[in-house]
Amino acid sequence: MDEMQLETPVQGTVWKVVAKVGQTVQVGETVLIIESMKMEIPIESPRTGIVRKLLITEGDQVEQDSVVAILEVI
């Protein structure tokens, strides 16, 4: 099983969690949305995979390069 960590490119607040644990996401599919400096920034899956863990919830503060999810690459 090949896993990868999904990280945030910016500091901000988790505005919305789109994907659910166990859900298959495609390349480019939005997993969650970060609000930073009044902008909504979608965090997309870089590979096709299954969401195995979400390490955040809506409203959480995240730093740049924070790991927010674990994906099982398929």
Image (cartoon, helix red, strand yellow):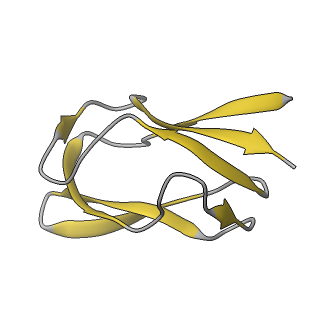
**Residue at the image point whose x is 63% and y is 56% from the top:** 45
Counting labels gives 0
- Quadrant hosting residue 40: bottom left
* Along the viewing direction, whichever of 64 and 15 lies nearer the viewer: 15
* Along the viewing direction, whichever of 53 and 33 lies nearer the viewer: 53
The answer to whether residue 59 is left or right of residue 68 is left
Judged from this view, the residue extending furthest toward the front is 22
* Along the viewing direction, whichever of 59 and 12 lies nearer the viewer: 59
**Residue at the image point whose x is 25% and y is 39% from the top:** 11
Q: Is residue 8 above or below residue 64?
A: below
**Residue at the image point whose x is 75% and y is 65% from the top:** 27
The answer to whether residue 33 is left or right of residue 3 is left
Residue 23: % across, % down: 61, 62
Residue 5: % across, % down: 60, 31
The answer to whether residue 60 is left or right of residue 64 is left
Residue 53: % across, % down: 50, 38
**Residue at the image point whose x is 47% and y is 60% from the top:** 20
The answer to whether residue 64 is left or right of residue 7 is left
Residue 1: % across, % down: 86, 29
- Quadrant hosting residue 55: top left
